[in-house]
């Protein structure tokens, strides 16, 4: 078509003219060379124009939400509520020894049952501070109380101290595992007002002598052998609440590390005080020596009361809420951004007994195990919780972020796992709370609200 | 030849560097997004122009040029004399407003490349090309609040969901053109239409308990397609030295059976895993149908220096399908795009003039009634084009640079109005290949 006689749309045929010119005519060849130089400049001009234009016009983008209403035909974010209808309350006893606090006292709580707690204490026989306990030396028990009171918060408490009736070990003590008391020989008794947090009780000389027998044992024995003989044969003291006791108090038996109770900045905890009455002339009286606790625990028992308020309540050391959420399969197709477990606190039972002071439950924990544990309380005690939540003041509910559990349940686990809910922690204080159960109003039912982004 | 190749490589290197620089910026400000309307359906039609008519904003179905390949009409491939290559790059800026807010987006992208080879010079030629057909390049933000836990008196959670969409439908085409008669040629193109859309979604929440893990929506599939072209011309029609040419091309509809995936990386049992959210969903598979397209036009060469081009493009978007979002599919309507332009070629003079006689000048305007009708409003586009061609007097390679400015959409009915401006650059090579040279 254009090849011979129609140069309009094609222009000249440089393929022909060029090659002839370049090969046969030096002047044209020179023009061609000049062209190449010009052409190089043109490429440079083009590149320069491109760069300048690109730089000027693309410095920044400012993407906005224009047209949001056009393209969206549904909500961007939606949620689905899964009610937790299938649950179990596991009643098992957790540990009560060697904890931060040791309960001592008794109280008949109309909501959570009659409780009695005997504190068990055993002094150390370490000879680092005291070489020998002689006949004339004296010992006393210095009790440091936490400010928390369960029961009548105004009443004074009276206690009697006896020797424990059997050998016990703090690490294996459990709630509702009663240790007998040898009521034959009282070691001491004392009374402590509600406002007082420290009591020093003089101990009976007969008990001191019995203790000294272990303390001053054969010096040829190693410290481990001395301790072994001592632990297996010396029952220690039992602080028993008197019959008219109206509250439970909590001895500080382990340092927290964040509390300073005296001027030296040393944290005071319950301990024994030793005072030598056979002072040598050349010794300066530096006051009583502290003999720390070798072992401690609580012999705590509770008698449950009628379930006037239902059975959906938890104790921090005795009752666990276990449930396995039945998540619908279609949730697997959603892009889940959050899952909140909601447990609403039922304060009605506590409000019905305003005169009873109780440690406030404001924290819950959730444990998830690969397999259901044989000893739930031991597993909960020894492992970190998977999730935790504080009480939300505005809703009076615990709002726990369980997103990871839901994701694991939907995408990861062939075997469905359960969540074990406990309140507070096992630290020796006594916590109890009622929760609204699945028969409550929808707004209060235990549930998981799953939020996802719509496509 | 060597110098030209080096120059071309240099220019391409600069372009690539520029593009990389643009993409290397912070994610929030990079030049990676285009028209807002490309977020609807499976994108906006990509108006790919032949290099020769780029300056007037028309495909060039009726405009033949011997020095750059024609992408609009397969019939032109039967006319070629030289082996031709072409690569085009474009930059567009979209300043979008609706009744409440505004945005500014910029996109740099490759407009395609083509390689055409004469098997029988001026008789039979083949073409291999890769061009975008439908393009989705957008960045969109959705803001809002939601009541996180109804009934519990919790503060509302604010969210911002950013969606970055890229991809579209690209056509990889192999075709031939044949000129059986002196003034008439035909052409056919067989193509693989590759659908690949990727939407990266990043939600952000005011409450840190809500996961901001990004997720990805991908739509992929392919299908083969067919395109036919016809071209005819008549010289000395109204006066001596003029020429009228007519071209038309028809692209048959293509239905792509596509798969849509919704996935994200999440930590499951303390291991990072790719989660397919819709793996077993019935709506994972769907159809994406490209519309029937009809292109036609007339080019009248008043002389060897001046030509006027008028073209019409029709796309039957009312039959297009996007089964993954039937609401947006309802927006599809038949599209008509028409344009008129003129070109001036002073470089064709036998004697060199001044500096300005080295260029090709183009001017044109196009009207597009749009492929979308939202709330009974057609999303129309009016563009003005101007082009500058750097044409060699002694070589067959050239550069075409074009600028355009226009308006798309409307602010009424709370729709989006876009001011569009940008430029395109086409690098064209034409050589006599596979022919033994007689002289050196």
Image (spheres, grey):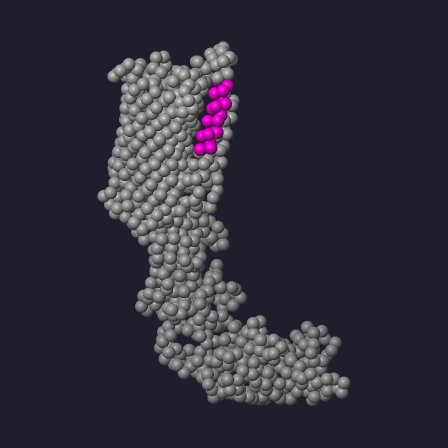
Residue A439 coordinates in the image, percent (x, y) = 32, 68
Visible in this render: residue A132? yes
Say which of A37 and B44 sits in front: A37
Q: Is residue B77 above or below residue A85?
A: above
Please determine whether, in this image, residue B19 is positioned above or below residue B150: above
With B327 as the anchor, is A451 left or right in this view? right
Asked if residue A263 lies in the magenta stretch, the reply is no
Tell which residue pokes out farthest to the front in this image: B354
Who's the residue at 32% across and 66% down the image? A442
Residue lying farthest to the right in this orientation: A282
At x 55%, y 73%, the residue is A99
Task: Say whether residue A34 is magenta.
Answer: yes
Q: Is residue B68 left or right of residue B250?
A: right
Q: Viewer-proximal residue, A27 or A257?
A: A27
Residue A388, position as x, y percentages in the image: 46, 65
The picture quadrant where one finds residue A170 is: bottom right
The residue range painted magenta reads: A32-49
Do we see residue B191 in this rendering? Answer: no
Name the residue nearer the viewer: B207 or A374.
Answer: B207
Q: Which residue is drawn at 36% across and 61% down?
A: B156
Number of numbered discs visible in the structure rendering: 0
Instruction: Place residue B370 in its image quadrant.
Output: top left
- Residue A47 pos. (x, y %): 46, 31
Q: Main secondary structure of the magenta part?
A: helix
Who's the residue at 47% across and 33% down the image? A48
Q: Is residue B264 above or below residue B193?
A: below
Residue B61 x, y percent position in the rendering = 31, 25
């Amino acid at each position: 078509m254009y090849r011979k006689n129609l140069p309009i749309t094609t222009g000249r045929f440089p393929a022909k003219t060029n090659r002839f010119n370049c090969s046969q005519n030096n002047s044209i060849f020179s023009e061609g060379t000049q062209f190449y130089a010009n052409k190089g400049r043109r490429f440079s001009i083009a590149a320069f124009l491109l760069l300048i234009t690109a730089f000027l016009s693309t410095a920044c983008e400012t993407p906005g939400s224009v047209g949001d209403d056009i393209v969206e035909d549904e909500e961007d974010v939606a949620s689905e509520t899964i009610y937790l209808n299938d649950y179990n309350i596991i009643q098992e006893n957790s540990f009560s020894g060697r904890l931060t606090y040791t309960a001592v006292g008794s109280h008949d709580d109309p909501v959570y049952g009659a409780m009695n707690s005997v504190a068990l204490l055993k002094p150390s026989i370490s000879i680092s501070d005291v070489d020998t306990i002689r006949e004339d030396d004296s010992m006393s028990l210095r009790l440091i109380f936490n400010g928390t009171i369960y029961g009548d918060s105004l009443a004074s408490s009276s206690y009697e101290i006896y020797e424990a009736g059997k050998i016990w070990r703090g690490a294996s003590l459990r709630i509702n595992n009663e240790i007998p008391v040898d009521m034959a020989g009282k070691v001491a008794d004392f009374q402590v007002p509600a406002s007082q947090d420290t009591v020093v009780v003089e101990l009976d000389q007969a008990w001191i002598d019995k203790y000294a027998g272990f303390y001053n044992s054969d010096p040829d024995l190693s410290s481990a052998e001395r301790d072994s003989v001592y632990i297996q044969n010396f029952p220690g003291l039992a602080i028993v609440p008197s019959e008219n006791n109206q509250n439970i108090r909590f001895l500080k038996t382990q340092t927290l590390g964040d509390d300073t109770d005296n001027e030296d900045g040393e944290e005071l905890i319950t301990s024994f005080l030793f005072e030598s009455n056979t002072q040598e002339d050349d010794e300066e009286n530096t006051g009583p020596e502290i003999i720390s606790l070798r072992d401690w625990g609580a012999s705590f028992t509770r008698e449950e009361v009628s379930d006037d308020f239902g059975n959906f309540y938890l104790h921090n050391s005795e009752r666990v809420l276990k449930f396995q959420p039945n998540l619908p399969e279609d949730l697997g197709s959603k892009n889940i951004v959050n899952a909140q477990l909601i447990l609403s606190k039922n304060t009605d039972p506590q409000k019905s007994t305003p005169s009873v002071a109780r440690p406030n439950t404001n924290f819950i924990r959730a444990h998830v195990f690969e397999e259901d544990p044989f000893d739930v309380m031991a597993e909960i005690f020894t492992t970190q919780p998977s999730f935790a939540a504080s009480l939300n003041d505005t809703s009076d509910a615990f709002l726990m972020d369980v997103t990871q559990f839901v994701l694991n349940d939907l995408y990861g686990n062939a075997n469905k796992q359960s969540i074990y809910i406990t309140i507070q922690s096992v630290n020796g204080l006594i916590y109890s709370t009622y929760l609204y159960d699945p028969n409550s109003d929808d707004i209060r039912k235990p549930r998981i609200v799953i939020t996802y982004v719509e496509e | 030849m060597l110098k030209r190749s080096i120059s071309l490589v240099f220019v391409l290197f600069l372009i690539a560097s520029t593009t990389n620089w643009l993409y290397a910026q912070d994610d929030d400000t990079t030049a990676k997004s285009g028209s807002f309307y490309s977020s609807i359906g499976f994108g906006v039609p990509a108006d790919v122009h032949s290099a020769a008519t780029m300056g007037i904003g028309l495909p060039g179905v009726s405009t033949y040029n011997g020095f750059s390949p024609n992408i609009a009409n397969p019939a032109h491939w039967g006319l070629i004399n030289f082996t031709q290559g072409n690569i085009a790059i474009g930059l567009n800026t979209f300043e979008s407003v609706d009744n409440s807010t505004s945005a500014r987006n910029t996109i740099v992208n490759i407009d395609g490349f083509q390689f055409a080879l004469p098997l029988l010079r001026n008789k039979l030629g083949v073409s291999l090309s890769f061009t975008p057909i439908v393009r989705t390049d957008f960045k969109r933000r959705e803001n809002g609040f939601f009541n996180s836990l109804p009934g519990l008196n919790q503060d509302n959670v604010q969210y911002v969901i950013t969606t970055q969409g890229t991809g579209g439908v690209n056509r990889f085409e192999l075709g031939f053109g044949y000129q059986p008669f002196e003034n008439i040629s035909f052409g056919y193109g067989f193509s693989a239409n590759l659908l690949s859309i990727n939407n990266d979604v990043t939600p952000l929440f005011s409450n840190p308990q809500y996961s901001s893990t990004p997720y990805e929506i991908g739509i992929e599939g392919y299908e083969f397609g067919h395109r036919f072209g016809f071209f005819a011309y008549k010289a000395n029609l109204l006066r001596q030295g003029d020429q009228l040419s007519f071209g038309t091309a028809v692209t048959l509809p293509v239905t792509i059976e596509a798969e849509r995936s919704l996935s994200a990386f999440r930590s499951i049992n303390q291991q990072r895993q790719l989660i397919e959210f819709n793996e077993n969903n019935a709506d994972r598979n769907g159809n994406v149908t490209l519309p029937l397209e009809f292109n036609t036009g007339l080019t009248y060469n008043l002389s060897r220096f001046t030509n006027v081009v008028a073209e019409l493009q029709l796309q039957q978007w009312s039959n297009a399908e996007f089964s993954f979002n039937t609401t947006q599919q309802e927006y599809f309507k038949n599209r008509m795009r028409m344009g008129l332009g003129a070109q001036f070629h002073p470089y064709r003079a036998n004697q060199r003039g001044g500096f300005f006689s080295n260029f090709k000048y183009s001017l044109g305007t196009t009207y597009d009634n749009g492929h979308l009708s939202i709330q009974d409003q057609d999303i129309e586009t009016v563009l003005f084009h101007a082009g500058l061609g750097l044409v060699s007097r002694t070589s067959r390679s050239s550069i075409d640079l074009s600028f355009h400015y226009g308006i798309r959409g409307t602010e009424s009915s709370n729709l989006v109005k876009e001011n569009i401006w940008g430029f395109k650059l086409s690098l064209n090579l034409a050589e006599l290949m596979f022919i033994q040279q007689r002289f050196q």
